[in-house]
Image: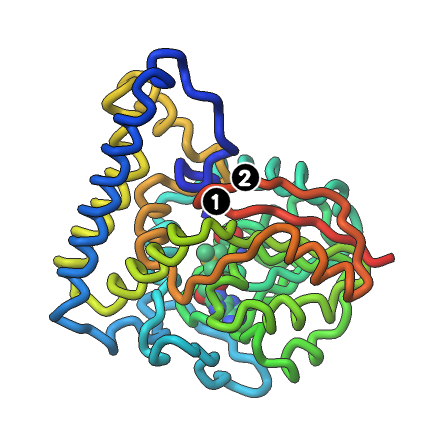
Amino acid sequence: MVETPYHGSGRKSLPKWEKRGVSQLRIRQSIFWFLLAAIALELASANVDTGSNKPGGRLAVPIPRNKAGCPDEPAEPDAGPAVRFAFGKNWTNFLSVVNEDRIAEATARLSEAMGDLQGKSFLDVGSGSGIHSLAALRLGASRVHSFDYDLQSVACTGEMKKRFAPGTNWSVEQGSVLDEDYVRSLGQFDIVYSWGVLHHTGNMWNALDLVSIPAIEKLMVAIYHDQGWKSRFWQFYKRAYNRRRRPAKWLMEVLVLCWAWGKPFVRRPRHTISRWRNYIRDRGMSPWYDAVDWAGGYPFEVAAPEKLVSFFIQRGFTLEHSEIRGGGNCNDFVFYRK
Ligand SMILES: C[S@@+](CC[C@H](N)C(=O)[O-])C[C@H]1O[C@@H](n2cnc3c(N)ncnc32)[C@H](O)[C@@H]1O
């Protein structure tokens, strides 16, 4: 997952011509949101597919399990446990396009966010493809442990290790950040890193609490910005997506891609094409896989930055730095223990 148009960086002031037509723009935006809501409602009304996205392996990579075996499905207060996005499938696709350029970009981003990792132990919570664990090793981390709830994500991280860092001090296993016994059994790490994960657990505030346990020095979390009714809309859209079968899912993915890239493309086609081409610079993911990830990423919760910061201050952390992107983006927070 990366900084995308829907993970873009902040709002910019509108050009003059657009300021004049701002009310027109608002009307057009309202119509767009209305249409999107209508389509989502239509898609949500039938053809429910509840069982297709359970964790399961498509990769022929052995999946290491934690000592307790597979934890139970995390609690999802507003949805049945079967309504869950199969992140790992997307990571499996991502593996087919990962290369040294993408790894180098992800490594540069991690270095910007976390500083020097030389000799540090690094825990990657919800490792997904495993690209950030690999980046941590490339930045000199002495030990890396990665875990993810989704078995296919675990397999992807395992494959990433096999391809790009065999024989390194990097362990990969299946586990849930909501499983307190498991999290405690991991011991302590200099750096705990969890990018874009905890809002997808189904119990975000509990996950935020538990993820702080192993952190000795620094804790990095990236959580979706709370944008009020828009966040509620996306929650609904994502849940609808996960209850659909393939053709409807495909349509919903394309809608997200159009939403993210359509307007910039119509306005500045050449610029948008070059942005598309350079997209991997944003944490090493392709626009299409990000669109699928955005359409389906459920469970989905959000947090207001001030609420999240005071949550960690109460737990003995100090904010080192944050990147507040706002809108439909993830905000990044790096805390250190006092
Ligand atoms: C959007 S992906 C982010 C992956 C990776 N951190 C990155 O930055 O690319 C979210 C990941 O969180 C994982 N996840 C969801 N619930 C989890 C849980 N309870 N424990 C651990 N991982 C979880 C998903 O399986 C998925 O791989």
The one of 309 and 19 positioned closer to us in this rendering:
19
Residue that mark 1 sits on: 329
Q: Residues within 10 Å of mark 1 (few under 14, many from 20)?
A: many
Tell me the quarter of the image containing the C terminus. Answer: bottom right
Q: Where residue 216 sits in the image (x, y, percent)?
A: 81, 62
Asked where in the image residue 26 lies, by quadrant, the reply is top left
Residue at 32%, 37% in the rendered image: 260
Say what secondary structure mark 2 lies in.
Answer: loop
Name the residue type under label 1. Answer: Asn
Q: CA distance from mark 1 to mark 2?
A: 6 Å
Q: Nearer the viewer, residue 138 or 129?
A: 129
Residue situated furthest top in the rendering? 16
Name which residue lies at 40% across and 41% down.
Answer: 6
Displayed quadrant of residue 56: bottom left
Say which amino acid is labelled 2: Arg
Can you identify the residue that label 2 sits on? 325
Residue ID at (16%, 51%)? 251
Q: Answer left or right for 34 relative to 58.
A: left
Q: Secondary structure at mark 1?
A: loop
Q: Position of residue 95 (x, y in %)?
A: 39, 51
Image quarter of residue 170: bottom right
Residue 314 vertical position relative to residue 19 in the rendered view, above or below: below
**Nearer to the camera, 249 or 302:** 302
Q: Residues within 10 Å of mark 2 (few under 14, many from 20)?
A: some
